[in-house]
Amino acid sequence: MNNTITHIQEEAVALLKELIATPSFSKEEDQTAGILCCFIGSKGIVHSRAGNNVFALNQHYDAAKPTILLNSHHDTVKPNPQYTKDPFAPLVEEGKLYGLGSNDAGGCLVSLLAVFLHYYDKKDLAYNIIFAATAEEEISGPGGIEYALNYLPNIDFAIVGEPTQMQMAVAERGLMVLDCTVTGKAGHAARNEGENAIVKAMKDIEWFNTYQFPKNSELLGPNKMSVTVIETENKAHNVVPAVCKFVVDTRINEQYSFDEVLSIIGEHVQATVKARSIRLRSTAIAIDHPLVQAGIRLGRSYYGSPTTSDKALMPFQALKMGPGDSARSHTADEYIFIQEIHDGIDLYIQLLNQLV
């Protein structure tokens, strides 16, 4: 395979246009998975599909060598209702490619695929390179990266393609959603009966709103807990509610495990607290990791990301990095600059050239 950088940049943009034109909401990515299979297959590359996940190994894969995963997702959220353009029409205006998923994370996906093609048939690489386009990232679904990893060989570290303006997100906050239930005793409001579950819940809510965890993170700052939903089953104005339920969104830095956070919460609140999931843990790749050091030598900055990605579901170190801007994600009239894709491919290759 003799692809010049310019050619694979042009192919990447053309592929992204095709992906934009094909709806691929989470759990409904079968058509874009087919497009990716056709594109990779047209290059004569053996590839595999597991569910709506598509992946391929470099031609000279050697199980004795360490392996780098290049990963991004091809599912999208549903279009923001404020779109003024057709979200499925890949329109180019003033250097911007508009369309749903163009920025999050289509530009990253096609850039990493272009980089995989660049290295695909090279001999004597120090690392194997695997490309994986995965599903269900936007909902952290079980049919995405977790499912795909069952079909992949051992991986040493990864680049996760998300829009970071090609800066390095070396850490991510973990996400844990808590369902909290406070129990009181029903009674008639006029007769000062019962034990008001709302009043009891207010004390817990105030604790969640004001508690400061002692360990901060240089990259991610302090843990954050936000009460986002509150409700009772009682609909009558004259009945003291026996049960009050509320939801807490917790964003956890890399200094704490979810079990530690739950233990601290349990020591301070009356509510029964249940975590919906402990899958989306906080993660960090070491600053002295060769991949991060390679980025630093290229003038890339590093930071802690407040958002979560498939990086949270990987049992190995991963760097989140890609073309585009996170601020455009999930917005109306989403776009990515075509030059961002070209530059992203070039920077990815410069980064990996220092390793492979």
Image (cartoon, rainbow, N blue to C red):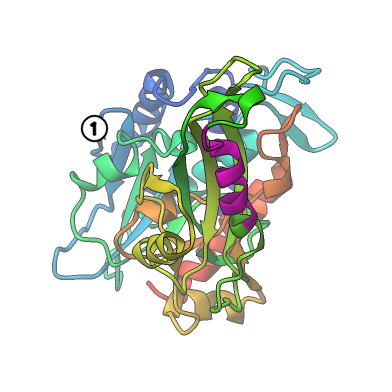
- Residue hosting label 1: 50
Tell me which corner region of the image, top left, top right, bottom left or bottom right, holds residue 257: bottom left
x, y (%) of residue 320? 51, 59
Q: Is residue 5 left or right of residue 238?
A: left
Q: In which quadrant will I find the C terminus?
A: bottom left
Residue found at x 63% / y 60%: 166
Position of 126 relative to 201 (above/below): below
As helix, strand or loop, the secondary structure at mark 1 comes to: strand
Residue farthest toward the left in the current orientation of the protein: 64
Residue found at x 60% / y 81%: 297
Q: Residues within 10 Å of mark 1 (few under 14, many from 20)?
A: some
Position of 259 relative to 84 (above/below): below
x, y (%) of residue 268? 48, 63
Residue found at x 49% / y 36%: 138
Q: Nearer the viewer, residue 83 or 230?
A: 230
Q: Is residue 199 magenta?
A: yes
Residue farthest toward the front in the current orientation of the protein: 191
